[in-house]
Image (cartoon, grey):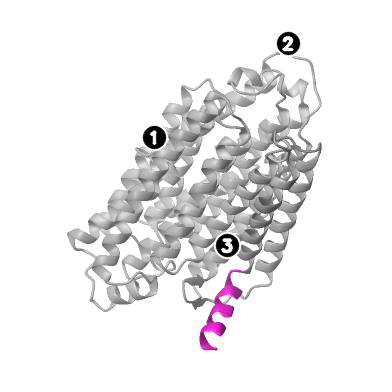
Amino acid sequence: MHLYDSINQAAGLIVPEIILIATVCLMFLAAPFLVNEAGQASSGLRHRWGILSLLALGCSLYALSRSSLSTTTIGPFHVDQLAMYVRGMTLIGGILLTLILWDQIDDGRAAEAHACLLAIIAGVNFVVVGNDLVSLFLGLELVSIPTYVLLMLPRRDWLSREATIKYFLLSIFSSAFVLYGMSWVFGLAGTTNLNAIAARVQSGGLASDTQMFRVAMVLIIAGLSFRLTAVPFHFYAPDVFQGVTPSAAGMLSFIPKVAGFAALLRLLPVCFGASVVNWVPAEAVRMMLTGLALLTMIVGNLLALRQTNLLRLMAYSSVAHAGYMLVGLAMGGNAGGTSGTTALLFYLASYGLMTLGVFAALASASSPEAPLRAVGDLAGLSRRSPAAALMLAVCIFGLSGLPPTGGFFAKLHLFFAAWSDGSQDGRTLAIVLAINAVIAAAYYLRLISVMYLETSTLLPSESKQPAATVASMICAVSAFVLFLKPQLLWSAASLIAAGP
């Protein structure tokens, strides 16, 4: 009876994830019966799967809103303010991605594509609620494995196959690094439970400054840096982005970053005997994170300047934004000024809205006859598709950090977090961040100038992807709301820094 109660209580902590996984199973089981031997399905079937996916995400959000805000640990699951924030962010991101994917998949493959997307969202949530090295790693793999399928489903040309194979092989290497690092932590601590590891460090039973422990941290950070697209683990991103659809590229630009930062915020504080609230990276770890942040910002932005392919440009932009977010992680829970952890989480949510808005607008403005693949394809978009051009411009302004969008406050908070730290590393990161924001504005504003100042011979056309249009409108409106009312999101992120 005691075991039965424990299982019930543990299941009560992950009701949103149970809803998603149940829907995934239903989709995979029912889909083969609705498709003939040639892989064809009745016209409009993708709309039904899209509606089911939105219902599952909506029910998960409702279940999350009904959950208790108190910190609770039962078995392999730990729910706190960080878990609630990340789960809400990924579920909202999942709704936007479902809308972008809606018309980019044919009827015969829609069920599998939406099921993979829901599985990825559930995997991110399992990462952030994980209270054990094993459950956390399983969550990371639940993100990775469906991603391979999702990248391949919408398109079957050689570019898509190449992108999928590259991501598959490099993802395996990154998982091996993470698992090897976790095995070192387990060998040193004698347990896989995160609370027990933190307790052993606090009691002095595990010296976090030993060479073996440092090797474990290097392996874990290196493995998770692949998901963040941090330099030098970024080289797969431009090729993969170029070979997949806008919906898949949007997912890769945001969801793996959430999983990577959630895993780092779970593992790094625990391995040094602290909580997310008061954790500040130790000297060796801070040096590593600072170096990663500097390299990632500089390399991402400089290479983005040279791109003529639109999706490759967005890939390097994604790399640069990972560098900005690493600034917040390197500062940690800075008690003397703006919290780096809070600034990171605020930026992550803002970036998610802006970047998904960009890919939604690109999907909305594209057509089979005139896909938007190169920067030059944007020429005259303001006349061909004025609504899509406006939404795209707003979201690009947000990514560049210019007012009146929430991206302005996102970058400003990261700058203050680094500058208020008072250390030489913090001041260096703040200055380099400001310089890189100016560099990024150059290639972002170039896209807007092409849309509004250059002419095109293509005729105006109506959007054939209304769901993606809705997603881009939601993101663009949210960008303005975050500028006018940034406290709404900042308060939610600050609850994590405030502690239980």
Q: Residue at x 72, y 24 (%)?
A: 367
Which badge, 1 or 3, is on the more N-terminal residue?
3
Mark yes or no: residue 245 visible: yes
| Residue 5 magenta-highlighted | yes
Helix, strand or loop under label 3 = helix
Q: Alpha carbon of mark 3 to alpha carbon of mark 2: how far?
A: 46 Å
What segment is highlighted magenta in the picture? 1-14
- Please tell me which residue lies in front, 104 or 431: 104
Helix, strand or loop under label 2 = loop
Quadrant in the rendering for residue 472: top right
Q: Which residue is mark 1?
A: 298
Q: Which residue is mark 3?
A: 85
Q: Alpha carbon of mark 1 to alpha carbon of mark 2: how far?
A: 36 Å
Counting from the top left corner in percent of width and height, residue 56 is at 71, 58
Q: Residue at x 65, y 67 (%)?
A: 64
**Amino acid type, label 3:** Tyr
Q: Which residue is mark 2?
A: 457
Helix, strand or loop under label 1 = helix
Which badge, 1 or 2, is on the more N-terminal residue?
1
Q: Residues within 10 Å of mark 3 (few under 14, many from 20)?
A: some
Q: Residues within 10 Å of mark 2 (few under 14, many from 20)?
A: few
